[in-house]
Image (spheres, rainbow, N blue to C red):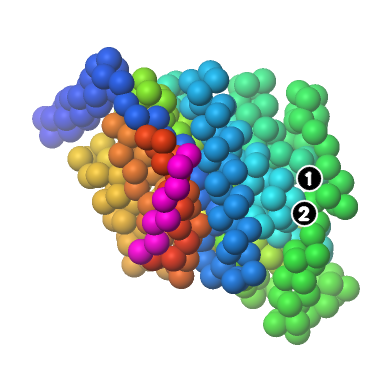
């Protein structure tokens, strides 16, 4: 009997959410992005503001053209993947051996279709590679060389290390190696090194979008963490971990300590909380506070619920965020900031 009551409750909850999503009431479209959480160096602050504003405006322009939430989210993320002020695409953090391996994922709320790539190399826009998985395969997540081949087969642009690796990424890796008193030449020691995970800030990028008709989408892209082992995959390409979108609940993109976001299932937990009646902001706060208490870790998330309400929350020192709505562009990095200008 209890099982049947629970099932009935779930069905009623979904039905109510569906009514809100398709009742014909037009909403204010929103393009909301983040540019990473953690401790952001002062020298990167201006660049992050400029890059996020460009991302929101590009996503907004795409949304005006075709009213497609996923296209807008991907367009916004691509701007940040090309900007070395962020840790995605160009400027991606380096593995302990000095190589670039990137992760990305997309999800469309209308049908909950999704695609992701992990540990992909030499692709300019990993977020496009993620979409190629969604659009051209029956899979959700593909890694390594398989992901790269699918990306190239479907027209994604290649990029060499001369484009992807920046001086800043090299400096961060050398600082990491000095901090742990190790050398890149110590191959066997590096493979068994348990101190991996030290990182100076998280620069993962992401976007969530809602259209005027209430359709949601989310996209997340990252270069990972400085000094990671080759093959390490964080939360960013994982549906329910670093990315999630469902027109009946919310769209979420996360940034932070990937391992803890995975353990706590943060993106899906936020959506569940929205389904339980939490606001987008309350849901983000509850999920991240839960993660911190149960498994540690820090970071943040941006959220849009099925009514277009905004949630922006982080438990790290800073998080870069920006959004466009009703003709205005809002930005911030530190707690309490909300700079506003015309979109």
Toward the viewer: 232 or 1?
A: 232
Residue 66 versus residue 184 in the image, above or below:
above
Q: Which residue is mark 2?
A: 100
Q: Which residue is mark 1?
A: 121
- Could you tell me which secondary element the residue under label 1 belongs to? loop
Q: Is residue 282 left or right of residue 98?
A: left
> What is the x, y in percent for residue 84?
71, 55
Residue 48 falls in which quadrant of the image?
bottom right
Whether residue 231 appears in magenta in the rendering, the answer is no
Region in magenta: 336-343
**Could you tell me if the residues under marks 1 and 2 are in contact, i.e. CB atoms within 8 Å?**
yes
Circle 1 packing at 10 Å, graded few (<14), some (14-19), many (20+), is: many
Q: Residue at the location (48% across, 39% down)?
A: 343
Toward the viewer: 39 or 31?
A: 31
Q: Is residue 219 visible?
A: no
- Could you tell me which secondary element the residue under label 2 belongs to? loop
Pick whichever of labels 1 and 2 is earlier in the sequence. 2
- Looking at the image, which residue sits at the far top? 24
Q: Residue at the location (37% across, 35% down)?
A: 326
Q: Residue at the location (26% across, 19% down)?
A: 25
> What is the x, y in percent for residue 103?
65, 46
Q: Is residue 23 visible?
A: yes
Residue 45 versus residue 323 in the image, above or below:
below
């Amino acid at each position: 009997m209890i099982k049947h009551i629970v099932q009935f409750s779930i069905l009623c909850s979904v039905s109510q959410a569906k009514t809100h999503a398709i009742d014909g009431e037009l909403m204010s479209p929103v393009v909301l992005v983040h540019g990473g959480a953690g401790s952001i160096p002062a020298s990167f602050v201006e660049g992050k503001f400029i890059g996020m504003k460009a991302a929101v405006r590009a996503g907004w322009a795409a949304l005006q053209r075709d009213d497609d939430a996923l296209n807008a989210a991907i367009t916004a993320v691509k701007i940040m993947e090309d900007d070395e002020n962020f840790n995605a695409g160009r400027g991606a953090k380096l593995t302990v051996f000095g190589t670039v391996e990137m992760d990305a994922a997309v999800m469309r709320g209308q049908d909950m279709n999704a695609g992701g790539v992990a540990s992909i190399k030499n692709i300019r826009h990993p977020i496009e590679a993620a979409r190629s998985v969604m659009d051209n395969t029956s899979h959700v997540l593909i890694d390594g060389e398989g992901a790269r081949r699918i990306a190239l087969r479907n027209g994604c642009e290649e990029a060499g290390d001369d484009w992807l690796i920046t001086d800043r990424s090299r400096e961060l890796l050398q600082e990491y190696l000095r901090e742990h008193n190790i050398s890149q030449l110590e191959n066997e020691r590096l493979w068994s090194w348990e101190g991996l995970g030290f990182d100076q800030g998280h620069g993962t990028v992401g976007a969530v979008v809602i259209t005027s008709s209430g359709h949601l989408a989310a996209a997340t892209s990252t270069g990972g963490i400085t000094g990671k082992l080759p093959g390490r995959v964080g939360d960013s390409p994982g549906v329910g971990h670093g990315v999630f979108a469902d027109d009946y609940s919310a769209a979420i993109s996360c940034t932070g300590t990937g391992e803890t976001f995975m353990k706590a299932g943060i993106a899906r937990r936020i959506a569940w909380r929205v389904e339980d009646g939490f606001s987008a902001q309350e849901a983000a706060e509850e999920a991240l506070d839960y993660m911190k208490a149960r498994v540690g870790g820090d970071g943040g998330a941006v959220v849009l619920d099925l009514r277009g309400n905004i949630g922006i929350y982080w438990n790290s020192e800073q998080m870069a965020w920006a959004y466009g709505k009703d003709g205005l562009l809002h930005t911030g990095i530190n707690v309490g900031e909300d700079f506003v200008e015309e979109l």
